[in-house]
Amino acid sequence: MIVMKANATKEDIQAVISRVKDSGLQAHLSQGVERTVIGVVGDIRKIQTDQMLRQNGVDRLVPISRPYKLASREFRVEDTIFPVNGMSIGDGKVLVIAGPCSVEDRGQLLETAHAVREAGANMLRGGAYKPRTSPYSFQGMGEEGLELLAEAREVTGLPIVTEVMEPDKVELVSRYADVLQVGARNMQNYALLHAVGKSNRPVLLKRGISATIDELLMAAEYILSHNNQKIMLCERGIRTFESSTRNTTDINAIPVLKNQTHLPVILDPSHSTGHWEYVAAIARAGVAAGADGLMIEVHAHPNEALSDGAQSLKPERFAELMDQIRAICDAVQRPLLRSPEPLINPASRPGS
Ligand code: PEP
Ligand code: MN
């Protein structure tokens, strides 16, 4: 990476970027409060080191020691902050994404969406394309599900997080979603990572079931390589020898990721435990450990859920958990994000 001097001008920075590009390499600009850095990706032997050091405004050239470059704290010291529908993600406030595992029908989705909003969630989750272990299980409602999610956003104001499983569907899902979720099973689907990178939409990237933290960061690097920095990393539990829970929550991953990368870190205590009884404890632990947010499955009638009912909280339990999360937020001095205002006044919504 090329570290610029504190007094480097915009023109100096532009000239360095042009020089990097003229050498057939990629230049990624990170303009922080403390310093401006230009990440150079490609065969760096093409760079004439002494000429580059003589460029106006250049302070020094430093190799990035990690296998991931743009995702590393070495490249970008400050936390990455990006907007989603007017909310700032990663700015120190705690984000709560909640909703059903799958979109099942209009009534189910709207009931849950209103309930999570009232309890204080900031974004609505719900899968329209579901990566199921069995091909015979419910696969999701597809585009009809996306339409219902868009309607839920209209009435609650909550931005939508929903999964995309195929590169060819990125365009379609982006028409409805505010955040594209890349699921655990697709963390190393490189064609998909390229496609969501190119889309320039915010991405929630889930850790693979057996992926190391470095592999998660390498997956993020694919998205960053397209100049899309709007990435939330999500710890969702990993496979271990332990069988009393669906997965094992790697709480360690939260401080490790906060240390190694500038990207915001989200914890999903629903998939990481697989049992609703354990979700609240792990959600609280995640906030205490420094997560930038949580993603929690909520279903108005978990016994009837078409997927992941066993790990879904009922709305009243989710509301109780939100109170506990507020208390932890106070203790760690990181306020909860404020939810966006509904686009339609709830009092005027049909049926109320
Ligand atoms: C989900 O969020 O519903 C999901 C399928 O999660 P994961 O990819 O972590 O299994
Ligand atoms: Mn699920």
Image (cartoon, rainbow, N blue to C red):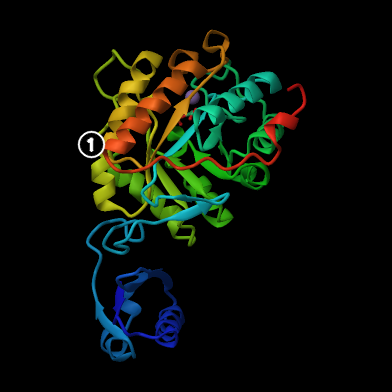
Q: Position of residue 116 (x, y in %)?
A: 54, 27
Disc 1 residue: CB within 8 Å of ligand 1: no
Quarter of the image containing the C terminus? Answer: top right
The relative height of residue 44 versus residue 172 in the rendered view (above or below) is below
The relative height of residue 5 versus residue 176 in the rendered view (above or below) is below
Left or right of residue 138, residue 337 in this image = left
Q: Position of residue 44 (x, y in %)?
A: 32, 74
**Occupied quadrant, residue 60:** bottom left
Within-10-Å neighbours for mark 1: few <14, some 14–19, many 20+: few
Front residue (pair 131, 57): 57
Front residue (pair 231, 214): 231
> Which type of secondary structure does the marked residue at label 1 adopt?
loop
Q: What residue type is disc 1 on?
A: Asn
**Occupied quadrant, residue 222:** bottom left
Residue at the front extreme of this rendering: 347
Does residue 22 show up?
yes
Q: Position of residue 328 (x, y in %)?
A: 30, 33
**In the rendered image, which residue does mark 1 sit on?**
252
